[in-house]
Image (cartoon, rainbow, N blue to C red):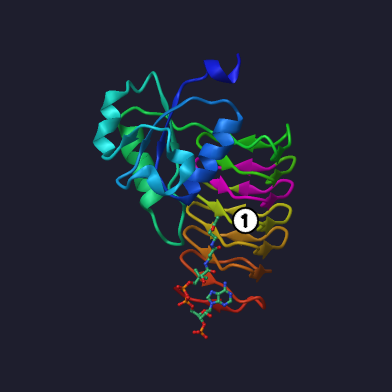
Amino acid sequence: MSNLELKPLVIIGGGGHASVLVDILLSQQRTIIAIISPEKNGERSIFEEFKRLSNDIDIHSYDCKEVNLVNGIGMLPKNLLRRRVNQYYLSLGYQFETVVADNAYVSPFARIDKGAQILSGAIIQTGAVVGAHTIANTGSIVEHDCVVGDYNHIGPRATLCGQVLTEENVFVGAGATVIQSVCLAQNCVIGAGATIVRNINRDVVAFSSNSHIEKS
Ligand SMILES: CC(=O)SCCNC(=O)CCNC(=O)[C@H](O)C(C)(C)COP(=O)(O)OP(=O)(O)OC[C@H]1O[C@@H](n2cnc3c(N)ncnc32)[C@H](O)[C@@H]1OP(=O)(O)O
């Protein structure tokens, strides 16, 4: 099946993350039929050609069996908006497309769950699992045998060394390094550039390069 025969896509969100996804999807000759965004598309030229729907409810103009969705809302630490938006559309029967950039490397022995987004230059090594609706951002590395939970964000150029385990809603900031076999519990935030050498408990924000841990 050529990419043109895959379901057309509706993008949710009109900001920077959405623009990166649209760039990837256009390079893969995917058909994008609309963008759902309360703000005008005009600011970013990449959105100019697309029909804009301004309300979530406008999705009803498309049959959930005929289109797939792509969540273009970027993830912020401790912000559950992205997850809530997904749950809303899933409850209406819509499905989220899994996006993998052509210039990402995904081992054939890795598993990418539904709705995950693997952006340009990301590397997902053998034996790794990337959970549903998780973002592996530009140039991130998920090493062998990592198990990354649902709704995580692995920031640009962040590295999870081998066998790291993350629970749901974990945010790993840009350029952070998590050494092998560490566990990151639900809702924790790893600050940009941090080096994490021990397990992080749920809801904790950890951000210094010498692994000083601050409670949320
Ligand atoms: C494509 C994309 O752009 S994807 C997005 C990528 N973005 C990221 O990775 C950002 C990740 N976010 C961070 O690192 C944030 O700074 C957080 C979440 C760790 C902390 O955010 P906040 O709670 O708002 O902390 P705040 O900005 O108030 O800083 C508190 C203190 O911690 C320090 N601090 C904050 N973040 C860091 C960090 N990553 N490393 C070291 N120190 C930090 C601040 O300098 C400040 O110190 P001070 O009190 O001595 O002035």
Q: Residue, x 61% and y 76% (percent of image)? A: 208
Q: Where does residue 176 sit, x and y in percent of width and height?
A: 64, 64
Q: Which contiguous range is marked in magenta?
A: 128-147
Camera-side residue: 137 or 86? 137
Residue 132 covered by magenta stretch: yes
Camera-side residue: 89 or 132? 89
Is residue 211 depicted above or below 181 in this figure? below
Is residue 64 depicted above or below 145 in this figure? above
Q: Where does residue 177 sit, x and y in percent of width and height?
A: 68, 63
Q: Read off the residue under disc 1.
A: 156
Is residue 210 depicted above or below 44 in this figure? below
Q: Residue, x 54% and y 44% (percent of image)? A: 20
Q: Residues within 10 Å of mark 1 (few under 14, many from 20)?
A: many
Picture quadrant where residue 174 is located: bottom right
Camera-side residue: 91 or 52? 52
Residue labelled 1 has its Cβ within 8 Å of some atom of ligand 1: yes
Q: Where does residue 104 sit, x and y in percent of width and height?
A: 69, 40
Secondary element under disc 1, as helix, strand or loop, is loop
Q: Name the amino acid, label 1.
A: Pro
| Quadrant in which the N terminus is drawn | top right
Q: Residue, x 42% and y 36% (percent of image)? A: 11
Residue 138 covered by magenta stretch: yes
Q: Where does residue 172 sit, x and y in percent of width and height?
A: 57, 60
Query: Would residue 121 be found to the left or right of residue 38 on screen?
Result: right
Camera-side residue: 102 or 123? 102
Query: Would residue 200 be found to the left or right of residue 210 on screen?
Result: left
Q: Main secondary structure of the magenta part?
A: loop
Picture quadrant where residue 125 is located: top right
